[in-house]
Image (cartoon, coloured by chain):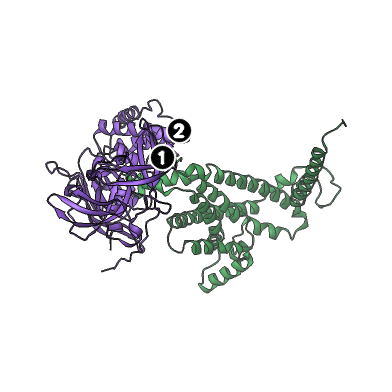
Amino acid sequence: MRGGPHPVIRARTAQMRGTAAYAILYLLFLYAPVLLLPLFSFNDSVFVAFPLSGLTAKWYSAMAADDDMRIALFNSLKVGVAASIASTLLGLTIAQVLTRGIPGRRLITGFSNLPLFIPDIVLGISLLILMSRLAIPLSLATVILGHLALCLPFAAGVLLSRFEGFDLGLEEASRDLGENAWMTFFRVTLPLVAPGIAASLILTFVVSFDDFLIAFFLCGTDTTLPVYIWGELRFPDKLPNVLALGSTILVVSSILIVSAEWMRRRGAPSQLRGAN
Amino acid sequence: MDAPAGCTVTATGGELNMTSPALLEVRNLTKAFQCRLAVDNAGFTIAPGEFFSLLGPSGCGKTTLLRLIGGFTVADTGNIHIDGEDVTGRPPEKRPVNTVFQSYAIFPHLNVAENIAYGLRSEGIAAGEREKRVTEALHLISLSGYGRRRPHELSGGERQRVALARALVKRPKLLLLDEPLGALDKHLRESMQTELRQIQREVGIAFLFVTHDQEEALAMSDRIAVMQHGRILQVDYPKKLYERPNCLAVASFIGNMNFFAGHIIGREHDDLIVEIGPMGRARVPVSTGEHFPPGSQVVAAIRPEKFMISRDSPPGEPSLDARVLSAIFLGDRTQIKVAISEAAPVITITAPTTAQIPSAAEHIRIWCRTSDLLLLRNEAASPWTRDGWLPRKRTKPPCKQVTLSRE
């Protein structure tokens, strides 16, 4: 008998090594460019180039001391919170309606997802034209309106997927046990879709916070953070500050997105089906 | 609309004695979905404390009828009275009935005790009293100590009990049960049948029980309503339903039945003279069926256990010479299939296992008493009566599309 593993197992191992190598290359391609940002944000030089000249956190403290940047950050937070709450409330309404099996349900679902595929620049220009036609002065309020249009498909998508597995029999059971439609919503529907609502709030906040194009068209003089960063890029010595800021946003956004996805999946639809 | 298979009767025997007023009274209830009548002019009454079953094949409208009574679906016409009050237009939360759903619909975000107490909050019952009632209910369903369990930790049978307790703590006047045992395996189902009946007696609440399982219905119910194509064909006591089905559809649905087409020759004193397909002429007591005028097309129905095997059949009783096709041992009895010729339909006989069982291909003589023959109206004559024979059991009833005229 010959030594070593069986030829079938050997072939299989080789195959698995190949797959693993491909996966690593794939992930490298996806993440390496983005990871350059945090890397250079700790580089002790205003020039973004290899070799790195030393390790420093000074760009982060410079960033924290920048008043204009802080104002822009607060603007972005205000817009994000307002847009995420408004779009989640509207998304909740549409998801509630669409799960009741009304006629034309698939058409409405399709149209509510369509804005995902409209280029932001088209959306931004159309909104700008609309605002100027209606003679609405550009401000954070117009950015919020624009972001509402941007975020709504995301909110509706997350909430619809949460409602998908929802057993309407649970609502009937609640009515049967003496609660009216409102109390049924608060005692049964809301607790069961709460993770979806949380996921929608986080996701839409991130979408709003990261948006540059629509804010660029609609913000007027009240700059949001991405618009502010765009402005700063004109000054080469400010670049490391922007890198520090970009890295911070990257980390916070990633945490938020991962937790949104975790929330959305928590209590998968099978748990919603009347524990059947 | 023509009633299926010659049934013209909506509700007959088994009427309540009218000394006690009906708890539930359903009158002329109709519900159409698009062009199909799901419930067609249904009417029946339930007495206080009664165990009443709605029995029918799936899709016969029994669940729709239950949902109409529960308030989850709005009727097109007709009335529902509970305890003398018209509840027809009321939403579910304003009806003195509660439901055990087929899917149980246990709230997954609440534990067992919270599920059971759910309906008590809207009644404004104090927390102490709520707790007491939940404890009682858990005891009733033999799940004491399960209060803190989560629904996903329960077995199917336990969930079913929780659904029952959740509805019963509300102390409804009538409890609606939508195929509650359907999802359980055979053994559990049988023990739950007994337990359910016991609980029902204990709490004294009237049960309206929906099922497609005739054995379940026969075993548990005080009375049964048989439904088909949205219509109630017969409302009766289980024994009467088996012994005296009022139409062909009920006769073929409940238990096994052999059918022979025939027609009435005439009447002599208290006997009807009937020509029955292969059996020839027979004198049947008028009491075995309605009084049919001479010439009317009828179906003679007979249960498998009413046939006897004997070389010498008594004179005057209908008999047949037949060849045994198969004999199947079923434990408590033996089922024998016979036919009078190659092409003729199969006749089913059951014999006690103690009897001498003929073997396959043997030629035997079978006979029955005329008093065991059941005469039923045969209005939908043609496909049923070809060659004077009827198929033993209908596989799929012809489905009629109904258009509801909106007046």
In the shown orientation, is residue B310 left or right of residue B26? right
Counting residues from the start of the chain, the first of labels 2 and 1 encountered is 1
Q: In which quarter of the image is residue B149?
A: top left
Closer-to-camera residue (A270/B67): B67
**Residue under the point 65% across and 57% down:** A226
Q: The green chain is which one?
A: A
The image shows residue B44 at horizontal and vertical percentages of: 22, 49
Colour used to depict chain B in the structure image: purple
Query: The residue tagged with tag 1: helix, strand or loop?
Result: loop
Question: Residue tagged by mark 2?
Answer: B154
**Residue under the point 43% across and 57% down:** A101
- Return the mark for residue B106: 1
- Return the mark for residue A87: none
Q: Is residue B156 above or below residue B296?
A: above
Q: Which amino acid does label 1 sit on?
A: Ile
State the separation of the CA atoms marked 2 and 1: 11 Å
Q: Mark 1 lies on which chain?
A: B
Asked if the residue under mark 1 is in contact with the one under mark 2, i.e. CB atoms within 8 Å, the reply is yes
Residue pushed farthest right?
Answer: A2
Query: The residue tagged with tag 2: helix, strand or loop?
Result: loop
Closer-to-camera residue (B171/B392): B392
